[in-house]
Amino acid sequence: MRKVRRDLNIDWIHNKGIRGKNIGVAVLDSGISGHPDFENRIKVFKDFVDRERKMYDDEGHGTHVTGIIAGSGNISKGIMTGIAPKADIISIKVLNKKGIGKEENVINGIKWIIDNGKRYGIRVVNISFGTLKKNESDNNKLTAMVELLWDLGYVVVAAAGNSGPGPSSISTPGDSKKIITVGADNDNVRMMVNGKMVYNYSGRGPTKQCIQKPDIVAPANGIYSCCNLWRKNYFYVQKSGTSMSTPIVSGIICLMLSVNPKLTNVQCKKIIKETANDLNMDKNRQGWGKVSAQKAIEKANASLLWNTF
């Protein structure tokens, strides 16, 4: 995470006291462990797989993703500090111990957010998984539910998926035209992703609905973050893929909202778009470009000043 923070100048933002405090982020994933870096900021855990009440993560993906967004880095003396280390965490388990999820469970998790999001201060929803459509009718219900979340004002951030480099390889729900879809900034190297060595893996557009995607790209390779096996002294683990780039953007949006809580999801998306750094790649590879945390925070702050007049 230290490398990511340096790349995106996150420490400059943290040094200004901007750390995502009081911004709730819901992480739909494989659950969460009680890693010390989450302190007392896990506000609720909901399990739609095995219906357990005690929080757990039997796969590890969710703990890692959450650490990228909101890990404090305390165990590592700051080295592994996440993007928004003061954000509130709402963990929703929809993936099983193999990292596989049923559409029904994901939809139930989304319905829970719709019913309880305001109560827990949820502003951002992170979805670091997806599935590929075989035809136009596949996963339409999931897409509709994700877009309902967006219409209700939540900032929904989803992964582009790791099925590139062919066209129309963006996964669902990342292929939704409304939400913010995140790809990898540099997948032109061989990386171990989900247990396989892959190359040029980041999902590409256009979608089957001819929408340009992804919207933005962020670091995705070799990201160290919180490990669910911390009780066995494995405090951090390395993972790669658009599952890792997605929480980076979610964390930056948490920082933006902590600067200016009045920002809408549409405004957040516009700011991320307008401040991106063009990588001179095809638009269906990079979208608007690489996310720029510092410029996004500066623009969010400028919007706050403008709103006061």
Image: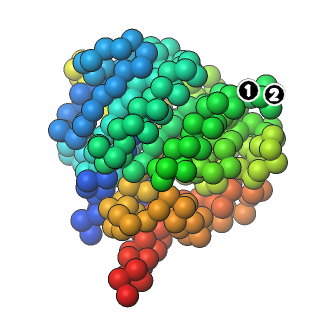
Q: How crowded is mark 1: few (under 14 residues within 10 Å), some or many (20 or more)?
A: few
Residue 174 on image: x %, y %:
63, 41
Residue position marked by numbered label 1 in the rendering? 138
Q: Is residue 77 above or below residue 16?
A: above
Count of number-bearing discs: 2
Residue at x-position 20% and y-position 34%: 36
Quarter location, residue 52: top left
In this rendering, position of residue 182 left or right of residue 248: right
Quarter location, residue 238: top left
Q: Which amino acid type is shown beneath numbered disc 2?
A: Asn
> Residue 299 shows which numbered tag?
none
Which image quarter holds the C terminus? bottom left
Residue 253 on image: x %, y %:
43, 57
> Residue 135 shows which numbered tag?
2
Residue at x-position 80% and y-position 44%: 209
Q: Say whether marks 1 and 2 touch (CB < 8 Å).
A: yes
